Image (cartoon, grey):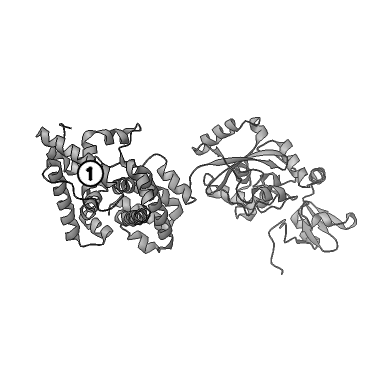
Amino acid sequence: MTTVPATVSGSAAALRRLRVPAPEGFVEAVLDRLGLATGEWFVTVTGPTGELFVAFNQHGISAVAPTSLYDGDTGRFAAEHQERTGAPPVPAERPPAGLAAALESGRAGKLRFDLAASSEFERAVLLKALEIPPGEVRPYGWVAREIGRPRAVRAVGSALGRNPVPILIPCHRVVRTDGHVGNYGLGVPLKLALLGAEGVDVDRLERLADEGVRFVGSATTHVFCVPSCRHARRISPAHERRFRTEDAAVAGGFRPCAHCRPTEVRRAS
Amino acid sequence: MTRGEAALLERLAVDLDGGYADFVRAHADAVYATAVRLTTSRADAEDIAQETFVRAYRSLRRFDAERVRSLRARPWLLSITLNLWRNVRRRANRHPESAHADAGAELPDTSPGPEAAAERSDEARYLTEMLAALPDHQRIPVVLRHIAGLSHDDIATALECPVGTAKANVSRGVARLRALARGSMPPGPQPGPPPGPQPAEQRSRQHVSTTGEAR
């Protein structure tokens, strides 16, 4: 007590020493109460072909991976996710809203995704792929054309290869421009399994691709589609017409389907 | 307003959710430190400080971009802190049992860490008690000036009083602290229950007398 100099005790400098810093975790606690928490969480859920790790944060779903890729080891998944995002994901009590329904239906258009780590071009590609309905496929060139970058077919392929949220954003529904199923970041067997699980007749698509057929049309409606289009699948064998090129279809008096948009839909002339 | 503060507010005006974490980080220490000097326990201080940022966020949601850009963030935040503290104290006055439950909590924190170390230092403990002994109309301006680091203008904003009044109360408060430290003036009566009157006053007197002997 005797060391307290009275003249110092009332001074601004002494008072400043009473500034107590906010306790650890204070900022996070506030953000958590406001639903603005910046952490990463993850859940293990059942996907169409097996269990999945799904990581998410306040912006949306940030990563999806089959648990088999990590031998089911949550620690390895968490470590890799931290390396990519800088934040260690912690197990979440509940999956993000709508995840189970999206996995069930194969339609994830209403889910929120955190694609902040992707480039603008990559985001455009991924969001376009998100529009492809379950049970149907589109060529890389279709994605390129639809996002207004018709020449960037190869870049579309690489962008899909870097999809941080595969299966939910269905890059497995994008196939080679010649109609063959093509590659997949998580391995071709998984791509085939995912397509098979949602009802795509992969063998038929491969056969058509082998024959050089890229479009099929209906002799009754004179509409042509990509072979996996839901409208193409309803065409009876007797009425099915096959085309190798768009020009051949148009020359035959066929117009492109408005659902699958096999080519740029032209205004009726 | 410094350029950093302006940039922070600009960010909030454009993207409140994205910028709010940085806003909280920028002001957390000042708000918490102020709450610690107003309340009688660390738990109360943390509650009030957290609630300050929760209320601030809700208000910012309603503000238009211009109002956010022209905000004097720190005095505005601290005026919220002060209101919350007054509410807590009013409740404590109405329900004395809960106030008594907190009465012992203002003892310095004995947990490890730099904060506790600072608090344990004799001078800091001594000064904490002197500060607690000031009447509110001086203690609050002194805390805003020297703990929260507000300018006299900002204190006037936070307390909704003229700048001259803010300035005078700060300097009278500091003068009174000096006088208390010299032991020439007994600590003033405690205005309300929160700083539990009995224990606080006893401890203060002891310190004053020991200092007196040393002189």
Residue B25 visible in rendering: no
Q: Is residue B207 left or right of residue A126?
A: left
Q: Is residue A113 left or right of residue B18?
A: right
Res. B208 image quadrant = top left
Residue B102 visible in rendering: yes
Q: Secondary structure at mark 1?
A: helix
Q: Residue at x 23, y 62 (%)?
A: B161
Res. B73 image quadrant = bottom left
Res. B69 image quadrant = bottom left
Image spot of residue A112 (x, y percent): 58, 51
Give whichever of A186, A216 is nearer the camera.
A186
Give whichever of A175, B27 is nearer the camera.
B27
Image spot of residue A66 (x, y percent): 66, 37
Q: Is residue A168 left or right of residue A34?
A: right
* Mark 1 crowdedness (10 Å alpha carbons): few <14, some 14-19, many ≥20: many
Give whichever of A9, B68 is nearer the camera.
A9
Residue carrying label 1: B201
Image spot of residue A175 (x, y percent): 71, 45
Image spot of residue B137 (x, y percent): 22, 55
Q: Quadrant of the C terminus of chain B?
A: top left
Q: Residue at x 64, y 55 (%)?
A: A146
Q: Residue furthest bottom?
A: A269
Disc 1: which chain? B
Q: Residue furthest right?
A: A238
Q: Quadrant of the N terminus of chain B?
A: bottom left
